[in-house]
Amino acid sequence: MKVRLYSLIEKSGMLLVGLILCAATASDAAVASLEITVAGNPSLPLENLVKNGGFEDGMKSWSVSGQPDKAAEQGWNVELSKDTHQGNGSLHVQAGNKAAGKTPGVWQNLKISNAAGKSYIISCWVKAGSGVTNVGGAYCGAGASAGLYSSDWKTSVKAYARAGNTGSKWVRAVSKPIKAEDWCKAAQMSAGLSYTAGEAWIDDISVTEAYVQLTISVKGHVKQLTLEDETGNICFDSDPLDGNAGEYSKSIQVQAAHTYTIKALGKDGVVVEKSVVVDRGADKNG
Ligand SMILES: [Ca+2]
């Protein structure tokens, strides 16, 4: 996809360069556009440690939290739903007022290996109704959390990806990264409602390594390159480049659970875009 984005001043400057270039190479065919390639370390998309995080295999790999046989008596309900962010299944959790002090939902153990020194992040897609609140912060609301534990489960570090009322829209909740220390030998995550009444749907839960090194390579005469996240926040800006080298390469560390867009301005004044999906939790709707 090619779009013109830069300011008129910049564009007219590029146009001038372009005209000079054309004059100098009048016999050449049209200016070749830029070719962008991206490699990730770890490789993309990042491995999702959550099994059946999109509930496409029903409730396979999940256990219902608490005392499922007393759910009705305690005023909560956990079930599979067809109201999804993607695919045919999602998790639907309801909690009545008398269950507002509970954490109804599902959980599973995560397999981690050689975790020490690595960081992890949890994300999920959440649709929460008007009754759901997260006034207590990350401990409360609708969504998912993940914990890294010592072998005796006594020491832990936790990450929370939760939302309050989402206006009945699907939104992506993303935790802060947590780092695994030497004592981290086990990992577990859960999804559902936490200390709130109300109703929520949860889908596409992902736990991955928190950071990935992107190596961006551009073939062609690139004048400037930026990397931005899904909110338009610029994560990297090359500033004006020479543009005569014919190739450009840059390695940038980014956080997982986001979608990135590379924009490269060619000598011809045309901006070439490439989107980078770091993990499977992100999709075309995200
Ligand atoms: Ca799904």
Image (spheres, rainbow, N blue to C red):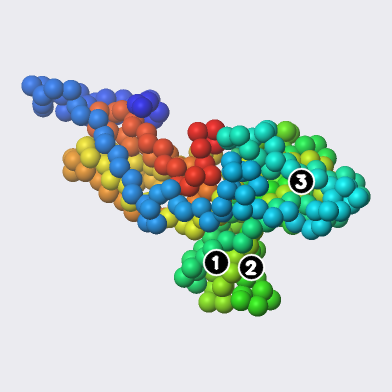
Residue at mark 2: 157
Front position among marks 1 and 3: 3
Q: Nearer the viewer, residue 99 or 245?
A: 99
Disc 3 versus disc 2: nearer the observer: 3
Which residue lies under the disc numbered 3? 78
Residue 76 shows in the view: yes
Describe the element under mark 1 as helix, strand or loop.
strand
Q: What residue is at 74 percent from the left and 43 percent from the top?
A: 79
Relative to residue 165, is residue 152 drawn left or right? left
Quarter containing ligand 1?
top right
Of the numbered discs 1 and 3, the one sitting upstream in the chain is: 3
How many residues crowd around disc 2 within 10 Å: few (fewer than 14), some, or many (20 or more)? some
Q: Which residue is mark 1?
A: 179
Q: Are marks 1 and 2 in contact (CB under 8 Å)?
A: yes
Residue at image coords 50%, 33%: 284
- Residue 223 vs 178, above or below: the answer is above
Residue 118 lies, in percent from the top left, at 48, 66
Q: What percent of the width, then of the height, locates residue 242?
A: 23, 43
Q: Residue furthest left?
A: 27
Circles 1 and 3: CB atoms closer than 8 Å? no
Horizontal and vertical percent position of residue 176: 60, 57
Query: In the figure, residue 224 lies in which quadrant?
Result: top left
Classify 127 as above or below 2. Answer: below
Amino acid type shown at disc 3: Val
Is residue 126 visible in this depiction of the protein? no
- SS of the residue at dot 2? strand
Indicate the secondary structure of the residue bearing disc 3.
Answer: strand
User: Residue 79 got which mark?
Assistant: none
Q: Quadrant of the C terminus?
A: top right
Q: Name the foreground residue: 41 vs 25.
A: 41
- Cα separation, mark 1 vs mark 3, equals 31 Å
